[in-house]
Image: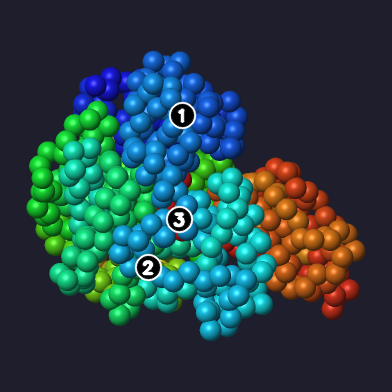
Amino acid sequence: MITALLVANRGEIACRIFRTCRELGISTVAVYSDADAGALHVREADTAVRLPGAAPADTYLRADLVVAAALAAGADAVHPGYGFLSENAGFARAVQDAGLVWVGPPVKAVELMASKTRAKELMAAAGVPLLAPVEPGSATASDLPLLLKAAAGGGGRGMRIVRDLAALPQELTAASAEAASAFGDGEVFAEPYVERGRHVEVQIMADGHGTVWALGTRDCSLQRRHQKVIEEAPAPGLDEALRGRLHDAAVAAAQAVGYRGAGTVEFLVSAEGRPYFLEMNTRLQVEHPVTEAVFGLDLVALQLRIAEGGPLPAAVPPEPSGHAVEARLYAEDPARDWQPQTGALLTLDVPDEPGVRLDTGYTGGDTIGVHYDPMLAKVIAHAPTRTEAVRLLARALERARIHGPVTNRELLVRSLRHPDFTAGAVDTGFYDRHLDALTATGTPGEDAARRLAATAAALASAAGAAPAVSGSGPARFGAWRNLASQPQTKRYRAEPGGTEHEITYRTGRDGTPAPETGERVLTARPGAVVLETGGVTRHFGVTADGDRVHVDTAAGAYTFTALPRFTDPAERTEPGSLLAPMPGTVVRLADGLAPGAAVEAGQPLIWLEAMKMEHRILAPTSGTLTALHAAPGLQVEVGALLAVVQDASAAAPVAAPAHASAPAHQEETTS
């Protein structure tokens, strides 16, 4: 019987496992890096053990340190979560060799599935349908497009889509280097890339007594950089024959390796409805909550039960009920090449409604750092039908209060309400086709709503600065006056990188503000403003943090930067400067890059690693590199000057913002 469990992970998944442990009466042990010393999973654990250092390679990927931590804390079992060491057979063996219970599949099963190339050979022998592999060295134009994948891991590391045969050698080298850095194994393989395919998977649960459950299907087709964004169960639009084929193939895959515990068999389903085996994840998936919601199960509790040697509760799984959809809330800017964001998370508040679940590793007041995946939370909605579940999730996200770095919240809401998604017509190319429209700003309705939010921000700011009228209760806009005030002006810039709004208002004789745009002010307090416009009353929650102002409304949320009344002409970026778009570490430079080198527009010059992703800094123009301040291993802050490029056609350098472009990421985060 397990009495104390160490979770060899961090963030959301550690917190989620701890929740089940508390319900089962199991004490909990966390491990943490120096960067995570104050993290939520550390605060929630009964005991915590420090892993000195900050980088994953020095901490969460050190199997020896994690096992030693379990022994030191008196744990008798280890749960790996997902990512990091969760599919590392050597770690599983080390846990068992130390006399600890491994809450995962047999070591042999992990070994067999750890290499995607070996796994495909095994699945072929078991009769599971596969895509034929392509030998990169002999690939021809007729084989394109190709998908390069790391053999030893997921999470999108070491993954590239190749559409140009001439680019294949370079992409192979880059994919192999990234795979070696992420997993310690540079093996990469190639297979045909299926255009407009769907990513469909089957959750399995197997005990040590011969029972294997196939717990329905999940669709995970909405991905950015091959990393899932929205998942749902059951997968929509599959006929019963195809569902049966997927279930049978998943069970065959589990039986072929003597599987035990929770696992997921992933398939690519072509536009013609043909399924192909992708891989088997020998661990719990990020998206497991949608299966839990539909089947009324706690998969972590079942993992623990099976690890203790117990059987599954029945020979067949319970009947599914309803539909569940999950959205991954990331600290990233989808409109700017999905750039991860860092900084203080002031507020994270998702409505606590029936059918809505929040799994997170953060609370308001936490800091989002540079070392780990930018996923903040998962929001899950469960309802009797798909339409109801999608609507419930979109509304919960829309009403959430999220103050701090830029997130993908607006993209999630728009995605859930996109006609293709609501119709269930999705595939892995969804964002390739629709991202520009989903991140577009500037429509008349949006501009009017944003300006109204800026008006509320200005009135709330004035209310906070105004003295209270004696005996009048909450602060109002100044004392009583004989004459109306002179116009007051406040300037705001919509974030990220939006338009500027200049808000002008007057304070009347009774102290009531009157915006010059004509809205009627019903309430104006530092944290709340109520306006009437066009006969409609609208409520605004306003939260200020320095020069940042967050405005929450029933129909959406807005972030502004308060601007000085006059622009400082000195606040200009030096022309031609390449600036770090985020905090991170310089991992490499282009071959031969040095001051005086000639560069071409769009040429990758500097590679920056931040939050588990690699970002390329591109030359903004063809010209000459006149300065280079970056070097491999250098840690930089956002806005740090990395290099300067002088335009070949100009006498002086031209303005050149740094452009970040990260490589493809696949299915799983590794938080």
**Residue 37 horizontal/vertical position (percent):** 51, 27
Q: Residues within 10 Å of mark 2 (few under 14, many from 20)?
A: some
Sequence-wise first label, 1 or 2: 1
Callout 2 secondary element: loop
Q: Nearer the viewer, residue 389 or 91?
A: 91
Q: Residue furthest front?
A: 125
Residue under pointer 2:
130
Residue under the image location 68 percent in, 56 percent down: 607
Callout 3 secondary element: helix
Residue under the image location 64 percent in, 46 percent down: 584
Give the residue type that dot 1 points to: Ala
Compared with residue 3, is residue 136 higher up or lower down, i.e. above or below? below
Residue under pointer 3:
118
Cα–Cα span, label 3 and label 1 = 22 Å
Q: Residues within 10 Å of mark 3 (few under 14, many from 20)?
A: some
Residue under pointer 1:
94
Cα–Cα span, label 1 and label 2 = 33 Å
Q: Nearer the viewer, residue 340 or 616?
A: 616
